[in-house]
Image (cartoon, rainbow, N blue to C red):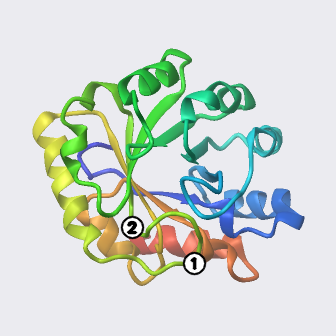
Amino acid sequence: MTTGKNKVQIAPSILSADFARLGDEVQAAVSGGADLIHVDVMDGHFVPNITIGPLVVSALKKITAVPLDVHLMIENPDQYVDAFIGAGSDFITVHAETGYHLQRTLDAIRRQKVRAGLALNPATTLNVLEHLWPDVDLILLMSVNPGFGNQKFIPQVWPKIQQLRQMINDKTLDILIEVDGGVKIDNAVQTAQAGADILVAGSAVFDGKNPQENVRQLKLAVNGG
């Protein structure tokens, strides 16, 4: 997945799902071919919104075998990593902007056999990765400013994806590139072509009556028949 030659994965974000029918919504997305389920955790401090905690991750773990991709948009992630690992997270991503001791946090995640991700906001440069390459399995590039769903994709992120892809390829690293924010059917192809391995899609999957078909259409767009 590091060369950009394998199929692009789709990770529906439950932030845009109907929480009154969350299990059904997730299962519909999985039946459409979802590769991961993306779980946005917000604390009302790092971002201006509050969402969910480990109990929801634990509940999702009971209804699907698809990997749970947990994105911690929270201050002091060290306090909560163990709880989310215990709940069944397969990936845990923390933000570069929140970490006082990022290497320690990433290492703590990986030591528990969970894949560690590092998220960068749109204005955060790739320089932050210089001394963290050995500690990450996934780099999440935000293509909106985090905190809310259904925002518009920031096009300046496309060259950032390309730059990151080139850096990973040049270093021959086994690191996935994930892109999160405003991904729709009309920009998914360009985002994939820029070098993304995983596209997080919230409203593009769940804003409508058919998450199953929406996932299928996204996968068809980025991977062809």
Q: Note whether 36 is above or below 50 in the view shown.
A: above
Image quadrant containing the C terminus: bottom left
Q: Residue tagged by mark 2?
A: 143
In this view, the residue in front, 95 or 70, is 95
Q: Quadrant of the N terminus?
A: top left
Number of the label disc, if any, that sits on residue 104: none
Please say if the residues under marks 1 and 2 sit with CB atoms less than 8 Å apart: no
Can residue 94 be seen from the camera position used here?
yes
Q: Residue 124: x, y in percent?
A: 29, 55
Q: Quadrant of residue 25?
A: bottom right
Mark 1, Cα crowd under 10 Å, few <14 / some 14-19 / many 20+, is some
Q: Is residue 153 above or below residue 181?
A: below
Image height of 154 relative to 201, above or below: below
Question: Mark number for residue 150?
Answer: 1
Observer-nearest residue: 13 or 169? 13
Residue nearest the observer in this picture, 50 or 143:
50
Q: Residue at x 61, y 41 (%)?
A: 67
